[in-house]
């Protein structure tokens, strides 16, 4: 199998990268599950945008403060300055954001934001954006989309990437040769007992990086979302109660129905406060009250949250719901520069898989979609510039053996164990991480 550019992952970063690559190049996008089972489809709250120049310093400071000033300031500036162009392009792709009566954008606010600067589509913003990107990708003749095709390993020699070893939909293993490879594999939620992520997102890119000595950064920086709907027993995926509901006025209560915290604290600080309150109360959850939000706004802005809670037996217009923190987002990952280049030649990483330093120790709400799109585009542009200057026709390195992949279950177990061990090795300086599987 051969392609010009291999993209591993069909979330918003992988698709946006594919759409910005030269259309004369063959692009192959592979995904471990079906095309819509990416965390990009699950993003509820929205996507940030620099509203005007007067908000630049505030937006920059909010991002830095949430990240405990460990952010890469150059990456933060690139993201913010690129936001208006990205939003304009998304609208051109048919993405529909909430509008005011006069047709202007409607904005919402989430925790740690000093003002409203988040665009949204009901409470399914990620789905609205990613399905429109997927539609665009399906219409491009140079983009091939392969479902149920899993990256098992990278093919490399002398610190240069030549593509990947993949397990195809029919169960066979093959070499997929590529001049450039982009890792857009998502996060590591599948390694957690309680996570808002899909279970198949198990850090495959991190495992490959460890095998091939590709530089990593801050892989112990793992964000816990403060509010997911509490249910007894292990769930396939924890249901997120968007931070936007707190931005619009929802409150948090202890077991005595007393408010105990500022609901708009950064996520890591709020998570710590909730966990401490649960410990004091001896309860596995706290209560979230959505009743301060007008019923009409609840039904218009958060219809899926309202419907899910109703399915679980709670009428959010009349009663509180139980919520608990759960693993949510991976701020660390494969170390990349501002053009999404890794430490290995011809290998890029984008989205949640990558760490360009935008988020620092803790991600500011609704920066993830924007960051993913901005730096995916920069990866595509860098690849396009390189491809225009040099025609790559690299032969596969000699001695690529397939024996190690024959026992698939053992290979995957070893890969996941390696990721967990590396997180544990580095986690002394990280956040509280409830629910990490042994």
Image (cartoon, rainbow, N blue to C red):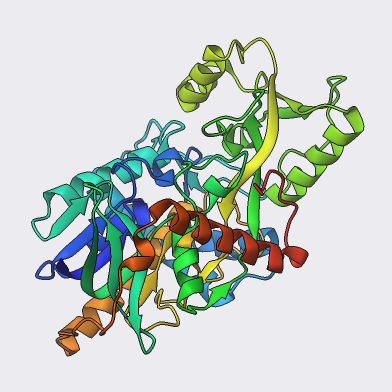
- Residue at the spot x=42%, y=34% of the render? 124
Q: Residue 221 appears at what percent x and percent y?
A: 65, 61
- Residue at the spot x=13%, y=70% of the render? 25
Q: Quadrant of residue 291?
A: top right
**Does residue 19 sit above or below 396 in this rendering?**
above
Q: Residue 313 appears at what percent x and percent y?
A: 59, 10
Q: How many marks?
A: 0
Q: Residue 381 appears at what percent x and percent y?
A: 28, 74
Whether residue 103 is visible, yes or no, is yes
Q: Quadrant of residue 431?
A: bottom right
**Does residue 376 sit above or below 87 in this rendering?**
below
- Residue at the spot x=66%, y=26% of the render? 230
Q: Residue 435 appears at what percent x and percent y?
A: 68, 43
**Residue nearer the viewer, 35 or 318:** 35
Name of the residue lying farthest toward the right = 280
**Residue nearer the viewer, 81 or 176:** 176
Whether residue 17 is visible, yes or no, is no
- Left or right: residue 245 versus residue 413 is right
Q: Quadrant of residue 338?
A: bottom left
**Does residue 25 sit above or below 245 in this rendering?**
below
- State which quarter of the image contains the N terminus: bottom left
- Left or right: residue 428 versus residue 298 is right
């Amino acid at each position: 199998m051969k392609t010009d550019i291999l993209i591993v992952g069909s979330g918003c970063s992988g698709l946006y990268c594919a759409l910005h690559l030269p259309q004369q190049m063959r692009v192959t996008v592979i995904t471990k599950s079906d095309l819509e089972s990416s965390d990009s489809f699950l993003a509820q709250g929205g996507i940030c945008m620099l509203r005007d120049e007067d908000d630049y310093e505030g937006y920059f400071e909010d991002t830095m403060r949430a990240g405990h000033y460990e952010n890469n300031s150059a990456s933060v500036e690139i993201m913010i300055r690129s936001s208006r162009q990205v939003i304009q392009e998304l609208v051109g792709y048919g993405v529909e954001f909430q509008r005011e009566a006069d047709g202007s954008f409607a904005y919402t606010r989430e925790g740690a934001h000093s003002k409203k600067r988040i665009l949204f589509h009901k409470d399914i913003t990620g789905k609205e954006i990613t399905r429109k990107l997927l539609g665009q990708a399906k219409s491009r003749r140079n983009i091939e989309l392969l479902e149920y095709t899993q990256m098992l390993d990278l093919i490399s020699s002398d610190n240069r990437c030549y593509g990947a070893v993949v397990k195809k939909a029919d169960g066979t293993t093959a070499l997929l040769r590529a001049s450039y490879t982009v890792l857009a594999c998502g996060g590591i939620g599948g390694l957690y007992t309680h996570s808002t992520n899909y279970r198949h997102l198990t850090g495959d890119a991190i495992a490959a990086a460890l095998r091939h000595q590709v530089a990593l950064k801050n892989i112990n920086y793992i964000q816990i979302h403060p509010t997911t709907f509490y249910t007894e027993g292990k769930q396939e995926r924890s249901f997120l109660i968007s931070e936007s509901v707190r931005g619009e006025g929802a409150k948090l209560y202890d077991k005595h129905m007393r408010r105990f915290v500022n609901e708009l604290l950064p996520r890591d600080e709020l998570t710590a406060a909730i966990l401490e309150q649960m410990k004091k109360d001896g309860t596995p959850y706290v209560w979230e009250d959505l009743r301060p939000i007008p019923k009409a706004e609840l039904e218009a802005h958060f219809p899926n949250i309202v419907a899910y809670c109703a399915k679980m037996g709670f009428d959010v217009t009349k009663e509180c719901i139980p919520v608990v923190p759960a693993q949510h987002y991976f701020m660390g990952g494969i170390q990349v520069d501002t053009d999404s280049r890794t430490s290995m030649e011809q290998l890029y990483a984008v989205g949640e898989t990558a760490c360009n330093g935008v988020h620092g120790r803790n991600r500011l709400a609704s920066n993830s979609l924007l960051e993913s799109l901005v730096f995916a585009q920069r990866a595509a542009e860098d690849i396009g510039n390189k491809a225009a200057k040099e025609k790559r026709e690299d032969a596969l390195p000699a001695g690529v053996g397939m024996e190690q992949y024959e026992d698939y279950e053992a290979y995957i177990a070893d890969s996941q164990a390696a990721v967990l061990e590396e997180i544990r090795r580095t986690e002394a300086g990280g956040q509280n991480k409830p629910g990490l599987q042994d």
